[in-house]
Image (cartoon, helix red, strand yellow):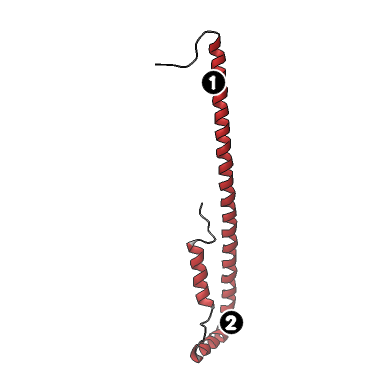
C-alpha cells in the first residue's frame, strides 16, 4: 500500500492552502489595504480558516495513521508468507513420511510412475 502522508493529494492540499494563507513577500499598499478591509469586514472568515487548518491537521494525522497501518500490514504479510512456507514444507514432509510408512508393508511407494 502506498504511503498517503507524502502522496500527491495531501501535498497538493498543503500547497494550495499555503498559497491562500501566506501573503506575498512584499505586498503593495493596495494589497495591504484590501487585506485589512477583508479582515474587518469578514470576522467569521478567520473562524473558517481555523476550521480548515484544523481539518488539514486532522487529515495529516489520519494519513500518518494509515501509513503506520500499511507498514504493519506489510510486516504481517511477510510473517504470514514465512509461516505458510514453513508449514507447507512441513506438511509435505509429513505427508511423504506417512505415505512411505503406509506403503512400507505392501511394497508400494504410493507414488505413480509412468
Q: Residue at 49% of width from left, 89% of height from top?
A: 28
- Residue that mark 1 sits on: 96
Above or below 77: residue 103 = above
Which of label 2 and label 1 is nearer to you?
1
Q: Position of residue 111 (x, y in %)?
A: 47, 17
Q: Could you tell me how far apart the alpha carbons at marks 2 and 1 are, in whole angstroms?
A: 80 Å
Q: Position of residue 18 (x, y in %)?
A: 52, 74
- Residue that mark 2 sits on: 43
Above or below 88: residue 18 = below
Q: Position of residue 90 (x, y in %)?
A: 58, 28
Residue 95 vs residue 20, the one in the foreground: 95
Q: Which mark is residue 1?
A: none
Q: Residue at 50% of width from left, 71% of height from top?
A: 15
Say few, some or many: other residues with alpha carbon within 10 Å of mark 2 (under 14 / 14 to 19 / 20 or more). Answer: few
Mark 2 touches mark 1? (CB < 8 Å): no
Q: Residue at 51% of width from left, 76% of height from top?
A: 20
Residue 71 vs residue 55, the one in the foreground: 71
Q: Quadrant of residue 100?
A: top right
Earlier in the chain: of badge 2 and badge 1, it is: 2
Q: Residue at 50% of width from left, 88% of height from top?
A: 31
Above or below 93: residue 74 = below
Q: Does residue 20 appear to the left or right of 50 in the view shown? A: left
Q: Quadrant of the C terminus?
A: top left
Helix, strand or loop at label 2? It is loop
Helix, strand or loop at label 1? It is helix
Above or below 75: residue 112 = above
| Number of marks | 2
Say few, some or many: other residues with alpha carbon within 10 Å of mark 1 (under 14 / 14 to 19 / 20 or more). Answer: some
Amino acid at each position: 500500500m502506498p504511503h498517503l502522508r507524502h502522496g500527491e493529494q495531501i501535498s497538493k492540499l498543503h500547497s494550495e492552502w499555503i498559497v491562500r494563507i501566506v501573503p506575498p513577500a512584499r505586498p503593495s499598499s493596495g494589497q495591504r489595504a484590501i487585506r485589512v478591509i477583508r479582515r474587518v469586514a469578514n470576522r467569521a472568515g478567520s473562524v473558517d480558516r481555523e476550521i480548515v487548518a484544523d481539518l488539514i491537521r486532522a487529515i495529516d494525522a489520519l494519513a500518518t495513521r494509515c501509513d503506520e497501518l500499511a507498514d504493519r500490514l506489510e510486516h504481517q504479510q511477510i510473517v504470514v508468507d514465512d509461516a505458510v512456507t514453513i508449514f507447507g514444507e512441513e506438511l509435505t514432509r509429513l505427508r511423504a513420511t506417512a505415505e512411505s510408512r503406509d506403503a512400507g508393508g505392501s511394497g508400494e511407494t504410493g507414488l505413480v510412475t509412468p
